[in-house]
Image: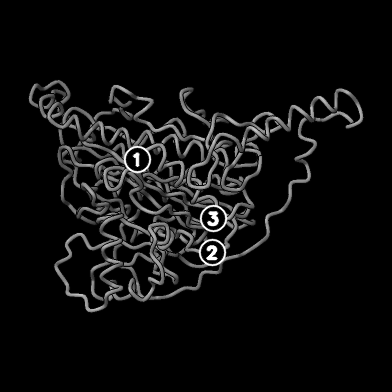
Amino acid sequence: MATVTAVSDDKATKTAAGLEEEEDDDEQGAEGEEQPGTAEGKKKKKKRNRKKKSATAGGAENGHAVGDATKGADAGTLYVPATGEIIKPAAEIRGLGSQGSSEFPLPKEQTYPPRKPINEIFKNGKYTPGEEVPHGTPRGGIKDSTRSSGAEAKMSEAMNEEMYQELRRAAEAHRQTRKYVQNFIKPGMTMIEICEELEATSRALVAEKGLEAGLAFPTGCSLNHCAAHYTPNPGDKTVLQYNDICKIDFGTHVNGRIIDCAFTVAFDPKYDQMLKAVKDATNTGIRVAGIDVPLNELGEAIQEVMESYEIELNGKVFPIKCIRNLNGHLIGQYRIHAGKTVPIVKGGETTRMEENEIYAIETFGTTGKGTVHDDNDCSHYMKNFDEQFVPLRLAKSKHLLNTITENFGTLAFCKRWLERAGAEKYLMSLKDLCEKGIVDPYPPLVDAKGCITAQYEHTILLRPTCKEVISRGSDY
């Protein structure tokens, strides 16, 4: 979830296309089936019916089927509870699966669709660490070769072991959720279907329990020129199209220890260069980061890499720019934006990174102007972390504030989640809380209409002995 700086007051209008999902004419012939009148054809048809029936059996959770692996008639096809259909994975039609590994397998202990909590897979409470790499060195500084072996550093890590395990549990839930998402997301699905299935999976894997564990913020699925902070509101009929470029940004937490991690989905290969540029820029920021490194050094390195790329679209070459008023950020306990910002262009804070800090390193590329502004129809909201007591006259506003405090605390939420928590006729009360500064709105952030934007993000932990890219996975 991005931090914004110097957002202008200009407004842009976002059009939501409500197109009907096309039927897949090839679904019936996926296996090269025999004629229905033959004995072999009847046998195969009966076998496929058994598989399809098993996909919907075995109970349900939040309206989604729960059970073991359920494959479709064609090898590699997947059952998606949110849509009730058997589809081919994105890897076969174009998407993340075709931009690296052809598959993103889940652990053999996990069910399909994934619903087994991570803490039931790692029963000893010891979770897999992320990628452990050396700290970056400040420009002109001397690398401290003794840091990773010092007794004091190791003692500090031992004292923070509980926090590390909470972060790793949240990260493993994120990894398994996104691997599942990368295999089922496809054009023709509505954004609500994508978000609700992702969130149901994430809630199950992190073993959601009030404010002790759950989702850290609403699922961002910003499309095309919209760079961040879009999630569908109730009734939104927007459908994912083949030509869309979609940023999937979601977070998990355990005891308020937040994993903030994002990737971009593009089915059309013409966007490959954009995705490559942004991924390279994010990895550059991660490589430079380290204890005592000034934040502005990350911004300079990120910009240099990002803007070394260009992309050809429809016969025209566009330079790829950083979105200069979107930033990475320090993450605190139950606080997604904890003060320090990580610029993605030259300049910015000279404040240094410190031991045991947690950062979201995220970069955004664009073919547009390189700045974003607020759009209409806000969906993201968050209670002001530093909120002082404000008297409320309206009983409905008081009731809504209680609902927000009990269900989300200081974590971000959206209108869909308010309704899931039982809120009714809440719009005027929500507006009242925003006007009084108790709740802050985070509207969609857009660049020039017609441009494309992309995002990649990881959460890193600056341990005393090394830098741990907690959210790193086999996918990115």
Identify the mark at residue 284; answer none if there is no mark: 1
- Find the distance from the CA under tag 3 to the CA under tag 2: 8 Å
Residue at 44%, 72% (x, y): give it: 376
Residue 371 lies in quadrant? bottom left
Q: Where does label 3 land, which residue?
A: 191
Q: How is the image coloured?
A: one colour
Local packing at callout 2 (Cα closer than 10 Å; few below 14, some 14-19, many 20+) is some
Q: Is residue 388 left or right of residue 274?
A: left
Residue at 82%, 30% (x, y): give it: 33
Kind of residue indicated by mark 2: Asp
Q: Where does label 2 land, which residue?
A: 236
Q: Is residue 451 left or right of residue 208?
A: right
Residue 272 at least partly seen: yes
Tag 2's secondary structure?
loop
Of circles 3 and 1, the one toward us is 3
Kind of residue indicated by mark 1: Thr
Residue at 33%, 29% (x, y): give it: 131
Q: Are marks 3 and 2 in contact (CB under 8 Å)?
A: yes
The residue lying toward the viewer, choosing from 141 and 422, is 422
Kind of residue indicated by mark 3: Met
Residue 346 at least partly seen: no
- Find the distance from the CA under tag 3 to the CA under tag 1: 31 Å
Residue at 55%, 40% (x, y): give it: 65
Name, please, the residue furthest toward the left: 152
Mark with earlier residue (2, 1): 2
Q: Is residue 117 left or right of residue 187?
A: left
Mark with earlier residue (3, 2): 3
Of circles 2 and 1, the one toward us is 2
